Amino acid sequence: MIILALHSAVIGLSEAAYCYVERGTAELPYAVSSLLVSSMAVPALLLRTAGAASLRERVPGWATAVSLALLCLYAYVALYPPPELGKMALHMVSAAIPLLMVASSRDPVRVLIGINMASSSLHPLLTEAPALFSFLSSTSMLLANAVGVLVISSAYREYGTLIIERWAKWRS
Amino acid sequence: MEELVLCLTAPLASSAVSLLMGRVERGKVQQHVVLMGGAVLSLLASLLLFSTASARGAIDAPTLYAYVEAADALAVVAVSLVALLASAYEWGMSIEGRLPAGVYASLFLSLLFCSIYMVVARDAVMLFILVEALIGVSVALVAHSRDTSAPEVAFRYLVITALSALCVLLGAAMAILATGTSDVMKPPARSREVLALATVCFIMGLGADIGFFPLHSWVPDAFSASTSTVNVLFCAEHIALFLALYKLLRPASYTPYAPAFTTLLVVLGLSSILFGYLLAYSQEEYMRLMAYYTISDYGYLLLLLGVALREPVHLPAWRMYLINSALMEAGMLACLGTALTREMWGSLSLKARRAVALCFVICALSSLGLPPLSGFYAKLLLYKAVYGFLLKCAGLTAATALVVVLLLLSLIPLALLVRTFHDLLAESVEERAGELGIPRVAALLIPPVAAAGAALLLGMWPQLLLPG
């Protein structure tokens, strides 16, 4: 959770820097690289602690597909940028990387954190929406997290393990 | 606007009351009263909303990011009705779950609130927020079941739908960046390419939430693991999710990419119908069979939505099919839920069991589109729309061939549902010592009888589902 908070803080600060730089001097590459490094470093760290073997053992097709689709979208935006999508590219690549972690992790807590990281990466895109939506969006995200914790704790009580593969054998 | 506020406040306030009552009072009876009271209040408020919207033509509430036409208000009535039936059914079933009674009742009413708001919302970001909240509530309700597989299924459901919410968020962000507004009622003036990309995100995101082919992987397991009350309640959620999908797709219908989206929806719809029917055929378990049958029904909705996107004159038919299919599926799921809870089924008198089986067959035949039931008109309008559209686009041969193929495919679920009806009647279950008391039997019979009654009533007066 500390990592998640750190990730969100970095994205928030980078966003602030992005806005500041966009209006002031043209030092955008610094903000961009800092956000990119944080987005890649944190998931890489988590992947490392999850165990390298798990990446090959469990890569659900759908999560990988979503992640790769985001990366393709990023590539498209980078190569043929429609002017409106310019500022989205970074967020998309920032969201795609935690999603790869979601696809590869066997630990439900890490999966939940990965989804949160991806969501945090995309939320700054709503800065142009009314302020009320930020509050409501945070509330709904909080609810989804609370439910995630409830489900994981129920699963742990029911199956006695936090390894996702071992849950499947209980399926009726 | 007051009617709309009332309509949104009724389930939300009831949800808060049940949560508070759960903290101070642990009685299940009181929770049932709050649950049913909240659902009844919502239904009354939605009827008021419907009468006002019908009289005025539409209610615009920009402060609530909502816009309600008479057809939307009718969908709100249907959502509230399904929730009321589910709450009555819950009283009859009265099965302990993992969640405390107060939390469960609160989540139940929160789902009703999110569904109602989703039907009336006119803002893409608001729809994303409601989708995210709805996911949270739905996953918790799936996890409520005592079934051993429920936590695993709930977690998978959470991950898939959370990713789908990300797609909706991405789509909403693209729509704002492209058009400068998140209002889905306004036709886009610029950046139509970006709006087309946003629409793809919406189809992927809401497609996974709804569960049509090929984004359906969680549906059969969720049907199988959830309690039957939750399965009945999810029929209300489907109305809201499909209407949200339509609203998010509507801006794209003004762009040059509209024909491409129609083709995409028609292909997805036909794939869902074929896939759902073929896999339903091989299912041994009733709830999984219903899950695949539901996926095929989503296919019909997608098919008609694709046509209606190009020819909005068919939208009333689409809405009619949506409401009718939700009501009939709620009825069928309630019948099967009672039969599957074997101790409950064994405690029912033979007369009550026959009544359940009869209601099941009426709902099933209506869902398949047999006259003189409500589904007949819904299916007739669907075939008429699809045939007319294909006649213009692909010619007489293709249009006739598709309609004939669809009619032939309908024989598969007919055989399946008749077999299920036979099982319901013929299944011998040991009678238990104590039969269920009259109030609980009555509560269990309310949803099947109401759905079967609606099939007969709306079959006689189908115009009730076609406001305006």
Image (spheres, coloured by chain):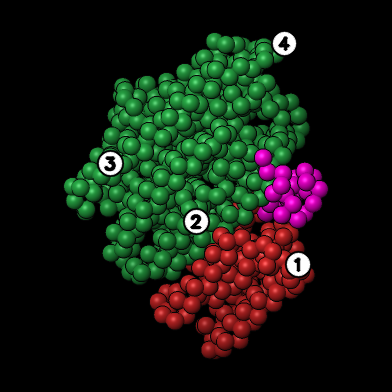
How far apart marks 3 and 1 lie (CA) works out to 53 Å
Q: Which chain is green?
A: B
At horizontal 61% and vertical 29% (from top left) the residue drawn is B35
Q: Name the residue at 31% across, 41% down.
A: B405
Vertical relation: A88 (above or below) B224: below
Tell me which amino acid carries mark 3: Val
Query: Between disc 3 and disc 2, whose residue precedes?
Result: 2
Looking at the rendering, the stretch of residues picked out in magenta corresponds to: A145-172
According to the image, label 4 marks what residue? Answer: B433
Looking at the rendered structure, the secondary structure element under dot 3 is helix
> Helix, strand or loop at disc 1?
helix
Subunit bearing disc 4: B
Q: In the image, is residue B130 part of the stretch drawn in magenta? A: no
Q: Chain of mark 3?
A: B
Say if labels 3 and 2 share a chain. yes
Q: Earlier in the sequence, mark 4 or mark 2?
A: 2
Label 1 environment density (alpha carbons within 10 Å; few <14, some 14–19, many ≥20): some
